[in-house]
């Protein structure tokens, strides 16, 4: 419980804007309340009240400014910060997230979480840790534990409670304040050194061990392997063991490194229907992501994504084509044709297949993370022309980002404008595809962008069907990336006739 009494109760107004509705939770030095926004009727926020020592108030303000600057779909937005000097209380106002904590979820399952959810959850945690750790001034979370992970009704993960997060300062040997939760905090949080990204990775290892032992263990002790559930992938044991090494230099050194280890493991993916695990493992070398982003409406992003997916499938690769937009309609219409569903009547399954490509319609980011743990060699993301934060982040982190735009003289600025707006991000991996563009338009754009991966796409009425001219362009685009073991396919549109 909070050591000092809160001055807030039902109906209290803080910050001249937020009316307290109820208490959501409490900890050693803080309480979290649900509040309604008096300026935005119907909007609810989580208000965290903490008691801060006046001597460290400057640090608290700096940390609050840092938290407000964060923007990631798996982090609550922190939108306001203010103080109440008479009591020493400070307040953070953040997104109210509907759901339950992972701790409560585990209790509901008597310590059991379905094994197929463990690695996707780990990848989601790693995704947000990688975001925090790779900022210009790295942010170390320092309190990763089941009580600080919120699961939404859609089973999406959110990291909550930044009460002891801090920015990493390379000139320091040790943390000024030692905080963390016993059983999940790294050894250096107890005085042996300064916390850094590897400290959060230790906590991830503790979290995974906790999940894999049904909530019995979060620290590596002799014989703990015997309590790890038998149905779980055995490659997890050495990964967890390395994460939980006492000395930081013996652990994985970055979230990206752990993600790579999970994806490289042959045991990580499940066998496809009709394919044994041993055969599936032989040709598995990690899932690669192709993200297709249109610069404007009607630029041809979906058409290009379909063509790319079937090109990869014809070369004997397992491919998932993902419609990363919850309200998009293109794949739903296609599914109606493929499965003979009456127009307007949605199928109960969001996955369907065309010529060996698995289509996933109206997909969330959580589904994408889950698919990364599957047996697909390539995942092609159809991002449409949406440039919201979530889809832009997926585009920027893809292995092969493809920008689709018009090569027309009056539309070329759409492409250069996108490149300029994202110039703070590395663009050496980007590829530009211009449907029906002339060779002069390609040459001009290459010069303007100072980038040689600009390609004209010839006319191609049926993206499901093989076309020699399109294949030549895509051969160049994916040169050195894929092996060419071609399969014979049949035209989708022809079969419909």
Image (cartoon, rainbow, N blue to C red):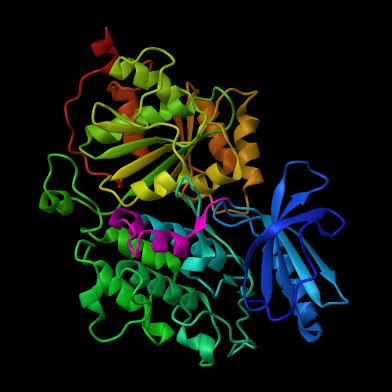
Is residue 436 among the parts visible in the rendering? yes
Rendered position, 340 above or below 172: above
In the image as oriented, which residue stretches furthest toward the top?
A: 497
x, y (%) of residue 347? 36, 24
User: Which quadrant of the structure image shows residue 81?
Assistant: bottom right
Residue 194 vs residue 233: left or right? right
Residue 160 vs residue 226: left or right? right
Q: Nearer the viewer, residue 326 or 150?
A: 150
Image point (52%, 29%), residue name: 327
Q: Which residues are magenta?
A: 98-119
Residue 96 included in the magenta stretch of the image = no
Residue 214 vs residue 30: left or right? left
Q: Nearer the viewer, residue 326 or 17?
A: 17
Q: Quadrant of the N terminus?
A: bottom right
Residue 118 included in the magenta stretch of the image = yes
In the image as oriented, which residue stretches furthest toward the bottom?
A: 192
Q: Nearer the viewer, residue 196 or 205?
A: 205
Image point (46%, 49%), residue name: 429
x, y (%) of residue 493? 30, 14
x, y (%) of residue 167? 63, 74
Image point (50%, 71%), residue name: 144
x, y (%) of residue 497? 27, 6
Rendered position, 176 above or below 459: below
Is residue 69 among the parts visible in the rendering? no
Q: How many marks?
A: 0
């Amino acid at each position: 419980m909070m050591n000092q009494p809160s001055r807030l109760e039902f109906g209290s107004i803080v910050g001249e804007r937020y009316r307290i509705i109820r208490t959501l939770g409490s900890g050693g030095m803080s309480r979290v309340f649900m509040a309604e926004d008096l300026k935005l009727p119907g909007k609810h926020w989580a208000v965290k009240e903490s008691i801060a020592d006046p001597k460290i108030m400057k640090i608290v303000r700096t940390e609050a400014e840092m938290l407000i600057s964060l923007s990631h779909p798996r982090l609550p937005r922190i939108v306001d910060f203010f103080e109440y000097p008479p009591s020493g209380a400070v307040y953070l106002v953040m997104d109210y997230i509907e759901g339950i904590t992972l701790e409560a979820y585990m209790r509901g399952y008597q310590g059991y979480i379905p094994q197929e959810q463990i690695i996707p959850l780990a990848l989601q945690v790693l995704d947000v840790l990688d975001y925090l750790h790779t900022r210009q001034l790295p942010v170390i979370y320092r309190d990763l534990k089941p009580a600080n992970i919120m699961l939404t009704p859609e089973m999406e993960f959110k990291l909550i409670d930044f009460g002891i997060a801090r920015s990493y300062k390379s000139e320091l040997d040790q943390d000024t304040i030692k905080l963390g939760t016993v059983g999940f905090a790294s050894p250096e949080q107890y005085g042996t050194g300064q916390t850094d990204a590897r400290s959060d990775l230790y906590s991830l290892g503790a979290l995974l061990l906790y999940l894999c032992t049904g909530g019995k263990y979060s620290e590596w002790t002799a014989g703990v392997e015997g309590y790890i559930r038998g149905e779980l992938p055995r490659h997890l044991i050495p990964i967890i063991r390395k994460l939980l090494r006492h000395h930081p230099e013996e652990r994985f050194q970055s979230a990206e490194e752990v993600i790579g280890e999970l994806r490289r493991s042959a045991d990580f993916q499940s066998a496809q229907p009709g394919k044994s695990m041993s055969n599936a493992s032989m040709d598995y070398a990690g899932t690669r992501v192709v993200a297709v982003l249109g610069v404007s409406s009607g630029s041809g992003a979906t058409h290009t994504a379909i063509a790319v997916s079937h090109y990869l499938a014809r070369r004997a690769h397992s491919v998932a084509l993902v419609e990363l937009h919850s309200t998009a309609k293109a794949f739903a219409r296609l599914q109606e044709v493929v499965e003979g569903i009456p127009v307007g009547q949605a199928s109960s399954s969001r996955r369907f297949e065309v010529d060996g490509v698995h289509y996933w319609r109206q997909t969330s980011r959580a589904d994408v993370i889950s698919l990364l743990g599957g047996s697909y060699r390539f995942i092609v993301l159809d991002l449409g022309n949406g440039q919201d934060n979530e889809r832009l982040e997926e585009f920027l982190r893809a292995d092969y980002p493809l920008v689709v735009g018009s090569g027309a003289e009056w539309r070329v600025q759409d492409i250069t404008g996108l490149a300029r707006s994202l110039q703070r991000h590395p663009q050496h991996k980007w590829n530009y595809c211009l449907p029906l563009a002339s060779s002069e338009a390609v040459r001009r754009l290459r010069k303007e962008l100072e980038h040689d991966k600009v390609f004209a796409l010839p006319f191609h009425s049926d993206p499901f069907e093989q076309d020699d001219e399109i294949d030549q362009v895509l051969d160049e685009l994916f040169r050195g990336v894929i092996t060419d073991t071609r399969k014979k396919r049949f035209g989708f549109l022809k079969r419909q006739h």
